[in-house]
Amino acid sequence: MTTKLDGKKLSNEIKEELKERVRCLQDKGITPCLAVVLVGDDPASQVYIRNKKRAAQKVGVKTLDNVLPASTSENEIIDLIYSLNNDPQVHGILVQLPLPQGINEDRVIQAILPSKDVDGFHPQNIGKLFMNKGELAPCTPNGIMHLLAKYDIQLDGKRVVIVGRSKIVGMPMIAMMLNANATVTVTHSHTQNLKEITREADVVIVAVGKAEFLTGDYFKPSAVVIDVGMNRNEAGKLVGDVEAASTADKVAFMTPVPGGVGPMTIAMLLKQTIEIAERSI
Ligand SMILES: NC(=O)C1=CN([C@@H]2O[C@H](COP(=O)(O)OP(=O)(O)OC[C@H]3O[C@@H](n4cnc5c(N)ncnc54)[C@H](OP(=O)(O)O)[C@@H]3O)[C@@H](O)[C@H]2O)C=CC1
Ligand SMILES: Nc1nc(=O)c2c([nH]1)NC[C@@H]1CN(c3ccc(C(=O)N[C@@H](CCC(=O)O)C(=O)O)cc3)C=[N+]21
Ligand SMILES: [Mg+2]
């Protein structure tokens, strides 16, 4: 019997609480506002921007979408960020990754004012996170931590294996799991014998970006499987990085795709935007 880690349900509960906090801000004349920068047409970013807009409306967070063509230059993106940094109406700035080929992502991220960095990707925020003094936590790993806590899944002393080391997911996940006193292993494209490593794990976080890449035989029966992947298969269906058919009945806990990590990412993004707005009082 596998327990579904229901991110959709938890995210709805969180959004209800956030509505109340937005009402309090509104009473003080403040509307929390998130500025989004999307350059190009990454498919996962399209899903994100659409669902995020709907969720923000529901909660009462204003969104300013800046959708730019893939041909936009690095300096144009940075100039836009500077203007958002200086706009007192804007509380949070989110630059969707990946940026198109040829654009230096690190330079763009460093242009964001650290106090408006809702994604927590600025080196200053990442540094604080690794020192366990985080203020703005990256939304996807933060959502995963909330989901694990909701289902009383203990991390202290547990073996956590993270598959993928991206700026968005894998790397900040390392810090949060270490801060939770887990024993952390990070795997990536140079890793050998991945299956031997994941089979030892109590918790496996998978963020590879390859449709149904890990099958049920990668996990032990008591494992908790967190599938971050957001891919389209040949039939155009949204699937994760874990093959649900061979895994879903085999492990102890698993996130569905859709309805798992994705909605939690959005709830954390809104929560963090509201927290920045609350600090402005
Ligand atoms: N649900 C949500 O809220 C979110 C979903 N996503 C989705 O999650 C997935 C991952 O995204 P993201 O982290 O940005 O992806 P990236 O492409 O930035 O990173 C992929 C990571 O996987 C590693 N990798 C690639 N091949 C292998 C392999 N064979 N074995 C082990 N590791 C491998 C890469 O290693 P190396 O570093 O060596 O290249 C890299 O670290 C995507 O499907 C994305 O759409 C992303 C963010 C949020
Ligand atoms: N700076 C930055 N931060 C990110 O967090 C970030 C990013 N860039 N670039 C793109 C990826 C992808 N991502 C998603 C978040 C939610 C859903 C989501 O809402 N998923 C729904 C899909 C529902 C559906 O439409 O069927 C679900 O899983 O249930 C998808 C994808 C965030 N990302
Ligand atoms: Mg990348």
Image (cartoon, rainbow, N blue to C red):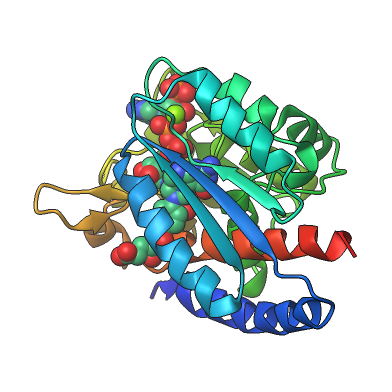
* Residue farthest left in this picture: 235
Q: Is residue 194 above or below residue 4?
A: above
- Could you say which is closer to the camera, residue 32 or residue 173? 32
Residue at 81% over, 83% down: 27
Q: Residue furthest top?
A: 102
Image position, residue 164 (x, y; %): 48, 33
Q: Return the x and y of residue 118 as percentages of the image width and height.
A: 67, 49
Q: Is residue 85 above or below residue 261?
A: above
- Observer able to see residue 154: no
Ligand 3 located in image quadrant: top left
One can see residue 105 in this view: yes
Residue at (72% x, 65% y) in the render: 274
Front residue of 95/12: it is: 95
The quarter of the picture where the C terminus appears is bottom right
> Measuring 68% from the left and 65% from the top, which residue is drawn there?
271
Left or right, 66 with reference to 230 = right
Q: Position of residue 4 (x, y in %)?
A: 43, 73
* Residue 194 lies in quadrant: top left
Q: Quadrant of residue 189?
A: top left
Q: Is residue 66 above or below residue 276?
A: above
Image position of 36 (left or right of 112): left
4 w.r.t. 196: above or below = below
